[in-house]
Amino acid sequence: MFNKKYNITEAELEIMNLLWEKGQLTLNEIVEESSKETAKNKSTIKTLLYRLIEKGSVRSLEQKAKENKYMAMISQKDYLKKESESFLEKIYKGNTNKLLLNFVEEKKISKKDLQDLLNLIESED
């Protein structure tokens, strides 16, 4: 079962990436950081942030006489694991073998990466 706190949209993921990278940020800091490449609307960011709070992905830290800070409630590692599992299940019906064969057949994996995978598999035995 997919926990809703891991059900993050692409727009929300931008905020999560900032929080994973920086730790705790205020709304203004999130707007400033996310607007470095292209300008972002503060109200849009606020809406995305509140959606993440509702899902349980982000938590608001109350600050006395200061702007609230926000922090991620899920780790990037856990999120990536859930996304990988979801992708594998959705596209390859959970079959890791098919995924790897696809990368090898389409030459999307270098010989070095393939050797690293083989070494990892051998070390697991």
Image (cartoon, helix red, strand yellow):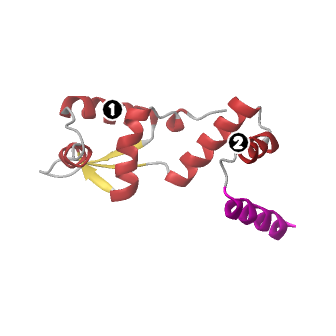
Expressed as whole percent of the image width and height from the top left, the position of residue 75 reads: 50, 53
Q: Amino acid at mark 2?
A: Glu
Chief secondary structure of the magenta span?
helix
Q: Is residue 124 covered in magenta? A: yes
| Residue bearing the label numbered 2 | 106
Q: Quick one: label 1 or label 2, which is nearer the N terminus?
A: 1
Residue 51 lies left or right of residue 29; in this view the side is right
Which one is in front, 96 or 43? 96
Residue 117 figure quarter = bottom right
| Residue bearing the label numbered 1 | 48
Work out which residue is located at the far right of the displayed protein and give it.
Answer: 125
**Which numbered tag is attached to residue 104?**
none
Q: Residue at x 34, y 50 (%)?
A: 18
Q: For the residues carrying marks 1 and 2, which lies nearer the camera in this image?
A: 2
Q: Amino acid at mark 1?
A: Leu
Expressed as whole percent of the image width and height from the top left, the position of residue 57 reads: 44, 41
- Element at badge 1? helix
- The magenta-colored residue range is 110-125
Q: Residue at x 20, y 29 (%)?
A: 43
Q: Is residue 116 covered in magenta? A: yes
Residue 116 lies left or right of residue 40; in this view the side is right
Q: Quadrant of the C terminus?
A: bottom right
Q: Residue at x 76, y 65 (%)?
A: 120
Q: Quadrant of the N terminus?
A: top right
